């Protein structure tokens, strides 16, 4: 179902009044920056991460998300207090004039998609979040998509770019690797995968293997390299952490562990030649 609210199509942008030019939109790094300011709202930090250019966000079942549109959001979108990230979380200065007195619950927000050419944000929500109660908060809404849970991947679509969101408490827990400064180059959520399971209670005391790589990229997991029986005293020739419960990204250090020393499996292989 798609609900159109054309009579309330007001200008949202507070950062610029000039329309997006095709020239600036062709500069992808400028139009779709990755380093967006964190949005602090009601005791939580909203941390947005750009996914692939020319893409829409999908869940683990490859389903797109329902959304509400906010037009008139011009580049740059990475200025503090502006852009899709702020508007999708906090709303816009024109909300009251539109009759938007209550916004959708922010904990149901999964990200946004930005279209530079049309200067439009699509605020993405889990299925079942949007209804007529929120129609005055957006230019239009599409509630037909069934995406649920966090953004898991993307589908190609010319002209839009997917941004996922990670929501965390502004006051982090005390101690442990999950309290380190976020490392977005290494980790998809800024922190090791174990931090997303049971509040990081089972994390090791060292930083684990990076997981933030482009889809289909090879050579990122040393547990999938060729066996090194002369190095590791394990049945599969890989570091022992590779076989621990939860897998390598939960247990293995960022740097491949040093050799164990003489391996009984090397002796076994030689004896069977």
Image: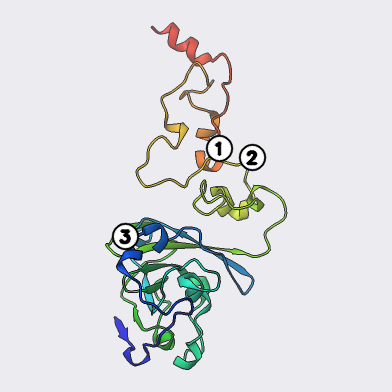
Q: Nearer the viewer, residue 63 or 26?
A: 26
Q: Position of residue 18 (x, y in %)?
A: 39, 77
Residue 246 position, x and y percent, is 52, 43
- Whether residue 60 is visible, yes or no, is no
Number of numbered discs overlaid on the protein picture: 3
Which SS class for mark 2? loop
Using the image, determine if residue 100 lies above or below residue 14: below
Sequence order check, earlier mark of 2 and 1: 2
Of badges 1 and 3, nearer the viewer stands 3
Q: Nearer the viewer, residue 175 or 40?
A: 40
Q: Position of residue 208 (x, y in %)?
A: 57, 41
| Mark 3, secondary structure of its residue | loop
- Are there few (<14), some (14-19), or many (20+) residues within 10 Å of tag 2? few
Residue position marked by numbered label 1 in the rendering: 254
- The answer for how far apart the CA atoms under marks 2 and 3 are is 36 Å
Toward which corner of the image does residue 253 lie, by quadrant? top right
Q: Residues within 10 Å of mark 3 (few under 14, many from 20)?
A: some
Q: Position of residue 51 (x, y in %)?
A: 40, 56
Residue situated furthest right in the rendering: 174
* Quarter of the figure with the C terminus: top left
Q: Identify the residue at horizontal 66%, vertical 41% (top origin).
A: 205
Q: Residue at x 43, y 88 (%)?
A: 133
- Say left or right for 110 vs 54: right
Tag nearer the camera, 2 or 3: 3
Say whether disc 1 or disc 3 marks the residue closer to the N-terminus. 3
* Residue nearer the viewer, 163 or 72: 72
Look at the numbered discs 2 and 1 and tell me whether their residues touch, using CB distance below 8 Å: yes
Q: CA distance from mark 2 to mark 1?
A: 8 Å
Find residue 54 and name its label. Answer: 3
- Which residue corresponds to mark 2? 206
On the picture, is 268 further left or further right than 161? right
């Amino acid at each position: 179902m798609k609900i159109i609210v054309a009579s309330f199509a007001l200008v949202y942008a507070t950062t610029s009044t000039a329309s997006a030019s095709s020239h600036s939109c062709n500069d992808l790094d400028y139009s779709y920056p990755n380093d967006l300011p964190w949005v602090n709202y009601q005791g939580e930090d909203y941390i947005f991460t750009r996914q692939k250019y020319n893409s829409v966000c999908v869940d683990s079942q490859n389903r797109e998300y329902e959304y509400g549109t906010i037009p008139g959001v011009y580049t740059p979108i990475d200025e503090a207090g502006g852009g899709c990230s702020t508007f999708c979380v906090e709303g816009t200065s024109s909300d009251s004039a539109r009759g938007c007195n209550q916004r959708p619950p922010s904990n149901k927000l999964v990200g946004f998609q930005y279209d530079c050419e049309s200067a439009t944000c699509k605020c993405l929500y889990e299925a079942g979040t949007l209804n007529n109660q929120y129609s005055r908060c957006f230019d239009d809404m599409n509630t037909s998509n069934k995406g649920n849970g966090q953004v898991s991947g993307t589908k190609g679509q010319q002209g839009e770019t997917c941004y996922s969101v990670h929501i965390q408490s502004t006051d982090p827990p005390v101690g442990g690797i999950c309290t380190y400064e976020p490392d977005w180059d290494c980790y998809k959520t800024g922190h090791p995968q174990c931090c997303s399971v049971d509040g990081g209670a089972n994390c090791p005391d060292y930083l684990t293997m990076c997981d933030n790589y482009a889809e289909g990229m090879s050579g990122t997991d040393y547990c999938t390299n060729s066996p090194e029986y002369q190095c590791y005293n394990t049945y599969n020739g890989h570091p022992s952490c590779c076989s621990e419960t939860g897998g390598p990204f939960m247990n293995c250090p960022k740097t491949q562990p040093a050799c164990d020393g003489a391996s009984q499996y090397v002796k076994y292989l030689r004896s069977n030649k």
